[in-house]
Amino acid sequence: MTARMNALTRVSGLLYGGDWNPEQWPEEVWAEDVKLMAEAGVNLVTVGVFSWARLQPAADVWDFGWLDRLLDLVHGHGIAVDLATATASPPAWLVRAHPELLPVTADGVRLEFGSRQHYCPSSAVYRAAAARLTRALAERYRDHPALALWHIHNEYGDHVQECFCPASAADFRRWLRERHGTVEELNRSWGTAFWSQRYGSFDEIEPPRTAPGPVNPTQLLDWRRFCSDALLALHRTEKAVLDEVSPGVPVTTNFMSMLKSLDYWEWSRHEDLVSDDAYPDPADPRAHVNAAMNYDLMRSLKGGKPWLLMEQAPSAVSWRPVNLPKRPGLYRLWSLQALARGADGILHFQWRASVAGAEKFHSAMLPHRGTASRGWRETVRFGADLRRLGELAGTRMRGQAAVLLDWDSWWALELDDHPSARMRWPDLLRPWYAALHDRGVTVDFVPPTGAFDGYRLLLAPNLYLLDTATADRLTAFVTAGGHLVCGPFSGISDRHDHIHPGGHPGPLRPLFGVVVDEHWPIPDGAATAVRLDQGGAELRAEHWSEWIDTEGAETVARYASGELAGLPAVTRHRHGTGSAWYLGCHLGADVGRVLDLPLAEAGVAAEVADLPTGVEATRRRAEDGTGYLFLLNHGSAACRVTLGEPGTDLLTGTDVAEGVTLAPLGAAVVRVRPVPRTSASPSPSTPAEERA
Ligand code: GAL
């Protein structure tokens, strides 16, 4: 089979390359760079991410000559360009002319020039300057044959997520007016009758700067929403320029995996393709589980469309306290993992290792030692792997179950003055995800507004904030035969973060057939025993438990120690033709023992049965039904995976009959014949896509 065109950028096959910062090097070095890129199979480079000061050395002075030469050079070597708008690091002359564009912390400290991302998201000066630069680049390069993709800015929200300066305060007030209409409505929504916080007009409102005590929670929640929107407004300004001046060239900005501060459901509506920067820690033996989770989110943001791994480290990063390199084979395995979960390209930070600056100890595709290095050998080897896998471009992976993710709820959950500060979204989600991952079950993420009905099983590790519309949609899902599993401290508050009256889980009470009488957080280091009614297995709850009374639900597990001994800890309620499971406690690593029950009831099984421990298996599918089975051995021992279907391992070109043997950190990508769909593998059109 030949390589398919890559829908992301119209470059053929899978994409390979990285950030290239040629402005850090004399031009003689560029010639060597492109020669080595060709040798490694690089077909896409990201250029210009931090080039503002070089492109526009003074307010009305432009220097595009070097970029003209660079683009011509790479094009001459058959390499395409992901051209950055270069707006992530405003130059010194702009900052000195307009110091008010620097961001201010909640304590009133103005952050200085000398790093990057030193701008206030609401600064009109910064926004205009960024739009001007974007327009200049777009007008100059829109027809350049090397241009394959526009790269807006860089990692919005990396260093600066919020700003408390007067310009931000004014923008916040504008945003509040739009959201609430009248100050009376804002007073109602913020519950300002509490602690005499009533406002007489919008002009009296400030951002939630450092205050003597707890700040109004709805003010904080609106602030989070506003901060995500303020950065998005910047992004949309640049996107609008590109859409106008350079239509038809796809546009992306690099996301930062599951980042709390930006509502990526909203953001991804403004992306032509989703791209992500991922830096799993080689020191963490379970890092691949978290990476899988982030990749599943990236794939889900555009309803399953292929996405791009825009940045990863070829080996060590330079920003952790201790930065471990990737041991031989790990880089390749982790790169394949992104492909396994739907990526159509693997790019890096960065192409050539810097010799100066804050990142000079960061690994690169071309390390300081040059082509004699181990890193370079891995770069060349993986480039060859990608060429063998070219036919994967455009194929899709689809999860067998869905996980509900709602940024609003995440933000509200983690506000202060709750029964326990231990209830944090990533800590609640990760054990659920890990349990599914360990069972070989793949998942997509869905937003609360998504259509859930393509799935048989929907998991909601937490739904602290829940409006009645979502509750109705969840109820309809179960009524129609879906299986819903919901974690503790859910259905608590409405979109203003006001408690649903009448007992938790608020509007979901009838669906789950339970009411929570009181929250019983578990002290740090302590645990409460939970026993499954069937089989009697004993599990461990930590950090959180709830006093639950059933209202029609059956008890699946109950507390076996502590104050709540004998009371229900896990329940199941048949509703319509489906079932609704409620977990009233945080079961940490033991949660899989409970999830096994709804998994079985929903008929959701592993992609490949009887996987050896540490082996990850996913399947991508082409439109013609051809399947691509990824088998990745994250373990340190060789193992054998038995396959029910014959195929060809694309990495080695060998035919595979009954199974494959995987070396430690080894992998296989097996092309298999079209398989009939099972009831647990839904159709290729996905809910979020239908939504978009
Ligand atoms: C990313 C950033 C890159 C580089 C990299 C180092 O967050 O986008 O510019 O700093 O980290 O790991």
Image: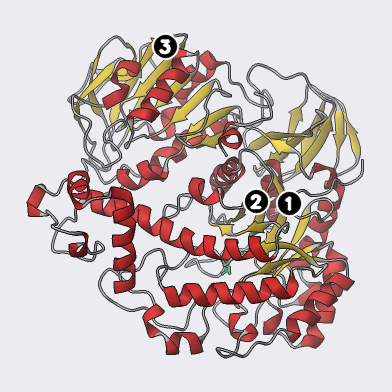
Amino acid on which the number 1 mark rests in the picture: Leu
Q: Amino acid at mark 2?
A: Leu
The quarter of the picture where residue 441 lies is top right
Q: Nearer the viewer, residue 157 or 226?
A: 226
* In this view, 150 is above or below 664: below
The label shown at residue 273 is: 2
SS category of the residue bearing label 2: loop
Name which quarter of the figure residue 618 lies in.
Answer: top right
**Image quadrant of ligand 1?**
bottom right
**What is the three-letter code of the residue carrying label 3?**
Gly
The residue under label 1 is 8
| Real-space Cα separation, disc 2 to disc 3, in angstroms | 48 Å
Of label 3 and label 1, which has the lower sequence position?
1
What residue would you read off at disc 3? Answer: 535
Which residue corresponds to the image point at 26% horizontal and 37% vertical from the top-left? 526
Label 3 to label 1, Cα distance in Å? Answer: 50 Å
Give the quadrant of the N terminus: top right
Name the residue: 69% across, 68% down. 83
- Compared to residue 581, the image places residue 18 above or below, namely below
The residue shown at (27%, 17%) is 514
Judged from this view, the residue extending furthest toward the left is 196
The answer to whether marks 2 and 1 mark residues whose Cβ atoms lie closer than 8 Å is yes
Most foreground residue, 177 or 339 = 177
